[in-house]
Amino acid sequence: MEKLVSNTGSVDKYQLHSKDSFIASAEAQIKDMKYRCLNLVVAFKFSADASDVEKFESRALSLKCVRLFAKVQSNLYLASLCEPSFSGQNQFRQMCQVIKNFFDELMAYSPKAHQAAKKCCIGISALGHDSDTVASAVVHAIQATMSNTGDDGTQHLCFFSTTLQAQLKRERVLENYLQQVIRNSALRVTYQPIINARTWQIAGYEALCRFPSTEQLKADTREMIGIAEELDLVSEIDLMVYQKSFTDFVSQLREEGNFINVNLSPNTSENIGLLFDFVEFLATSVDLDMSQIVIDVNELKPNSKPFEFREVLPRLKDKGTRVALDDMGMGFDIAYYLESGCFDLLRISRSFFRNFSESGTHHQVVKLLIQLCHKYHIEVIAEGVETLEEAQLLAYLGVDYMQGYVFSHPLEMDELKRSLAEVHERIKLVTHCNYDEPACGDASGGADVMALAEKNLPHMDPGEPISLAYEYQRSLEAEVLPVINRGECVGLIDRPTLNLHLTPAMGTKLETSKEAAIWNKPVAGVMDVHFPRVEKSMPMSELIELVRSNRLSLPVVVVEEGRYKGVITQRQMIQQLTNMCGPN
């Protein structure tokens, strides 16, 4: 029998407490907790003539999920429910799951006790939400039981917090809606093109589920999938998407070498190996080769059963199917999963690159992640790419595939077929070299200097260390790095400038402590602050003439009213002059 020691003395977990004893013991337990927890006080109020109340009392007292249990009156009981709370977890969903776990365990112990509990009024108070102390939580939970019970005598569950109660009602509406969608096979499937960042062709399509009419319910797909996982219905959704997307792909989109990308949630009680058997069956039924399927393994939730990927994924890969790790969702030990040999691709979400414009450090993080993946022969898909600049820079950093609104929103099949020409036009915008347009005619024909500028070079903050500049120039082969402060270019760092501050021994075993300290010096102390600037509106022909006549030296910073817009380097200028001298 588990003992819980507190300042109230030795407390028996399976003791039937009084109200005061319950409050004192619960306060002591919370005080002694060494980790973040969700704490609920639940009141159970039975009708005067309710049967099996004693059965409920004896069984509820023994449940593992119940930390403390109290009898307040002959028909009124209290339970303390507690569960570890993880960062980023939806607290309301966790509350619902804790209550569900209580009833599931009670049902396993005694169906009669479970039936009795279903007919009582249940009041819930959540510490940290509607109460700050256990004493106030007890009062709130008991008050919440005074909500009227339905005419059919069934359980009436009520949160003391009106906000949480409104969420509960909304949750029930969404649960019923979800079950109706699955029952009627009303799930929609949309497709988003995936672009090969080397060939700049459509390499495949990701199939994404969409729920009809969720706008009126104010619920997005992510929330609906979360509910499906809690109801253990997510595998049914996955299979519905597989069936429709495989059929659509074979009849409408299949070309040599391209693929259909589907998602799999490991947050299910279903046997994952059996789900893969269904994948093979559905693919075979429409004559789809398994090598044209990519399966994204989505994030594993903290309270889900372990996903033994080393056991099930090799069998799938043996059939030619590629497997993607979705946004490092398997946890933070990324190297463990990458070196396992079970994954062929890694998805990185927009959170990795949406701050490219704010700090040069973000470029380096993405570059190092890509290099790590390529070391293990794993390709990288960047999702959520929204701008031309992001697409160009991600390609520059070595991403293998990308998808996002810059190319196309997820579209249903008919609309996608009509939009493919537009997708190809969007790809051309991304791949359009900055110096190509004037090469098609006379350089003096009105093009401005922005057509030559490198707009997506990694840039640095003045306070960032020399070591970061060295890594950029070594791994990215950047000809020059702009140093940006509040939108203004305050300096440039090129390799010769950087080398003036380094020694041959730096980075080797012969490096001294004095030399090691140089790596941490800010780039503000080594950057070149004397460099030419030109307005972005300057005609390209004028810039070329200034360079040819040695009145302007490269690199040149392009600005607009003082704000940094890009850099024109020797490489761009040589390419431009070569194009101009070539055949028209």
Image (cartoon, grey):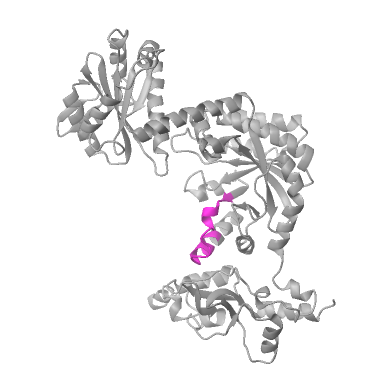
**What stretch of residues is rendered in magenta?**
347-366
Residue 15 image point, x, y percent: 22, 21
Query: Taking 514 as reference, is 7 left or right?
Result: left
Between 434 and 85, which is closer to the camera in this rendering?
434
Residue 424 image point, x, y percent: 74, 55
Query: Taking 203 as reference, is 464 left or right?
Result: left
- In the picture, the quarter occupied by the N terminus is top left
- In the picture, the quarter occupied by the C terminus is bottom right
The residue most toward the left is 8
Seen in the picture, residue 545 relative to 134 is either above or below; the reply is below
Quarter where residue 107 is shown: top left
Q: Is residue 405 magenta?
A: no
Between 27 and 125, which is closer to the camera in this rendering?
125
Residue 235 image point, x, y percent: 58, 30
Seen in the picture, residue 177 relative to 519 is either above or below; the reply is above
Between 360 and 130, which is closer to the camera in this rendering?
130
**Does residue 508 appear in this view?**
no
The residue most toward the right is 583
Quarter where residue 284 is shown: top right
Seen in the picture, residue 360 relative to 254 is either above or below; the reply is below
Residue 136 image point, x, y percent: 22, 32
Q: Is residue 356 magenta?
A: yes
**Does residue 463 appear in this view?**
yes
* Residue at 75 percent of width and 72 percent of height: 437
* Residue at 77 percent of width and 77 percent of height: 579
Quarter where residue 465 is shown: bottom left
How many numbered marks have been drawn onto this rendered protein structure?
Answer: 0
Between 307 and 414, which is closer to the camera in this rendering?
414
